[in-house]
Image (spheres, grey):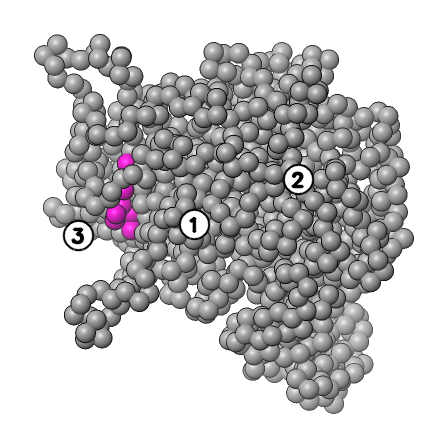
Amino acid sequence: MWFIVTLLFLPLVYSVDRSNFKSCQQSSFCKRHRELKGGESPYSLLLNSVQVSDSRVYSEVINIHNNVMFTLEMIPMKDSIIRFKINEKNPIRTRYEDPYALLDNLEGEKFQVVDQSKDGFTIKTGTCKVVVISHPLRLDFYQGEDLVVSANARGLLKFEHYRQKPQEHEQNEDPQGEKPAGEHEEEEDQNGLWEETFKGHTDSKPNGPASVGMDFSFANSKHVYGIPEHADAFSLKETGSTDPYRLYNLDVFEYELDNPMALYGSIPVMVSHTAKHTAGIFWHNTAETWIDIKKSPDSNVVTSITGFFSGGEKEAPEVQTHWISESGVIDAFVMLGPHPMDVFRQYGSLTGNTNLPPMFALAYHQSRWNYNDEEDVRKVHENFDKYDIPMDVLWLDIEHTDGKRYFTWDKHKFPNPIEMTANLTARGRKLVTIVDPHIKRDTNYFFYKELRDKDLYVKTKEGNEYDGWCWPGSSSYPDWTNPEAIEHYINTYSLDRYEGSTLDTFTWNDMNEPSVFNGPEITMQKDLLHPWAGVEHREIHNIYGFLFHAATYEGQRRRSAGKLRPFLLTRAAYAGSQRTTAKWTGDNTAEWGHLRISVPMLLSHSVTGLTHIGADIGGFFGNPDVHLLTRWYQAGAFQPFMRAHAHQETKRREPWLYNESNLKIIRDAIRTRYRYLPLWYTLFYENEMTGAPPMRPIWANFVEDVESFGIDNEFMVGSALLVHPVVDHSVMTATVYFPPGVWYDVLDYTIYNGPASASVQAYMDKIPVYQRGGAIVPRKDRVRRSSVLMRDDPYTLIVALDMEDKAQGTLYIDDEHTFEYREGKFLYLSLTYEDRILQSRKIDPSGVYKTRSWLERVIIIGLKEKPNKILLNSSSMGTIELESSFILGKRNQANQLVIRKPGVNMQEEFTITLQ
């Protein structure tokens, strides 16, 4: 039997076979929608049906081609968000609406309905308005007086109502030959309406066609971003000559680059950005989804012949998008900004923000499929100490279990897991073990039997327990829509049930798309049943992995009675996943192209809420040469989630296995990560509070910098650091684009002025990173073997002056691992430099935390002259004079003032004055 399983796996391990995955032409609902010509839409709003309540505007819509009736609800929401829903008025069965992604108790906003006429009406709320045009139905969304988004402007709305099968409705026809409303169907391709076959797998489609689609146009825009997960450019490409971008969670080994194929996650959020407006769309649908993109007109096209000869205005640019989902309803949120940080905040108000991770989760992680046994684990973490490389988390893949039975251990290889974990935690480190959603079908396996006895698994359409193939062989898959299955899984994380685990054991949820090796497209059949919810798998496919990792989070939270912050990593994700998990970009490859594409992939997640995101350093498949591995460590040091990981058939690649020169560069990259942990931690706190992504595109901070809108080979860390990873082989220089302002190389303080591009040196030991003039960055420069051991260490403040000799920043401090910060045990500090005075003040006076950390050093970059005297004032120290040294910059390097050992505790407000 295992021989058969091995043969089944081989084609998947070594390369992606595109024929395993559907194209739009092979997905009948996508094909039907894509063949729409647009133009005049058959959907009209019935003005005599309009009803206005305190929370919404209700109306009815008719498809004049078949007389099917729909409901349209317009729901103005807090903070410049407009929600609208289109559903069947009288469906023959209830259409599925996802109850999981959104936060509870979303707040509405006051509004007025004005300008009612035979053509429609207008809804005004705050600074926004929606002009609703009745025939054909069209929704125009304005921020102020500017049109930002239009829905159904191209007439591509298509809502396939539920209907009876042809043989059934023939029996129900009126005796005089009249058919019920809805049975006068548009002429359309009948292929795939009631059954569809792909590579030997037949989808029975018992409910028939039920797809929904609509177009959204972004006015005056040339760039849209988001809708991860795809291995493609950050500024999304036109799809006229390719498939649409696909959102359908799939296990794609060694995925291809620069194409719109579906990958592991599906976040149906798109952001448009122009110099004047930022706007976003959240298409709230958990079924398979495709998105077409068209950009028009060509920048050189003029609106008319008259305009051409008169030098008249060119036609305004526009990005036209077409969203298509297999089932469900149309439930769309239009986020009207008007600026990037507004859209990030608005989306966070709908699906939540990333919870502040424990500090160790932001540090360096070491993983491999698999560390062989306890002795291997011991040697690996001892070598990190031997070679003076910090490391916080060691990971164990599937081979640590007893025959791929999760929540168990291989007693021969890992006989003493608690002792093994204690040896890690004694040095401030943590352990991660893997738990996947496929459950080995073995009646002697406690977890399988418990769920089987309670009848908690996904079923076939005939009502039998589904049997799919994954790592353990024959496997069953829990029905995560069932609260009892969720509760049982959550309780299995308790220390008495998960034997060998401790409070320092954390979790990796892999293969949760879900991956099914013998299923269509390597996943579940769509006509499988989730009995508790009473729905087919097609309805919830993209949120199956979300439900799994959300339960994992709750299991970790409860095992400590809600005291300790969980940490877990997922591969599959949906909108709202950021509330409970970090994510990585899956099974990448040890190639320079995969290093290059990691930056736009991470940015696409960052602007759509999933901010704790990373890519496997070195590539999962293949053996990176030392240059690629070194450059990948340098890039990873400035990305939100930093983990090295590798396939079991690759050569071992721990840093000390390379020559001394490259070992030093890799060590320096990891140690650099640790020095900047205070900055990352502060940014993730602010991310939880405001939705602002720690890793962000340049335009998020430089809203009007048009040159940056198409850049995806560099990024910002917060508003302080500009990072340009080197992603090409044998490159010793890089062309860096500097946004407006003054920038300082973080290593030698060379000055660059923007907006401009410059060629910079990028030798193997060089990471092109620049601090913005006007930013104050907190660091900890005493790097130890783990972040836990650095908790009470002192801070260094890097003050980079702008052209007006000013700077500002923030610093957040708490205990780094519990939820006590939500009870007021924290410090959130404002750091400012102006008029030669550096100050630290509490932003939130209610926050109180007794830290042992103190201020060890202040480095002021760009100071024009040496001060005569430097005085510190605080409540406990009074006024004292500080020692310093002033270093004149050479050539185009900035001057530095180094203030040594101010000594003030960071919980005190203080002032440092340069006289």
Horizontal and vertical percent for residue 555? Answer: 66, 31
Residue identified by numbered label 3: 115
Label 1 and label 2: CA atoms lie apart by: 26 Å
The numbered disc on residue 270 is 1
Q: How many marks?
A: 3
Horizontal and vertical percent for residue 447? Answer: 68, 19
Mark sitting earlier along the chain (1/3): 3
Mark sitting earlier along the chain (1/2): 1
Give the residue type that dot 3 points to: Asp
Residue at the (25%, 47%) spot, across then down: 154
Residue range in magenta is: 150-158
Q: Nearer the viewer, residue 754 or 128?
A: 754
Residue found at the very far left of the displayed protein: 176
The N terminus is located in which quarter? Answer: top right
Residue identified by numbered label 2: 568
Q: Nearer the viewer, residue 841 or 396?
A: 396
Q: Estimate how packed mark 3 is, as few (under 14), some (14 to 19) or many (20 or more) residues with alpha carbons within 10 Å.
A: few
Label 1 and label 3: CA atoms lie apart by: 30 Å
Q: Estimate how packed mark 1 is, as few (under 14), some (14 to 19) or many (20 or more) residues with alpha carbons within 10 Å.
A: many
Horizontal and vertical percent for residue 874? Answer: 73, 72
Residue at the (87%, 55%) spot, across then down: 387
Label 2 and label 3: CA atoms lie apart by: 51 Å
Q: Is residue 300 left or right of residue 431?
A: left
Pair 2/3: label in front: 2
Residue 630: within the magenta? no
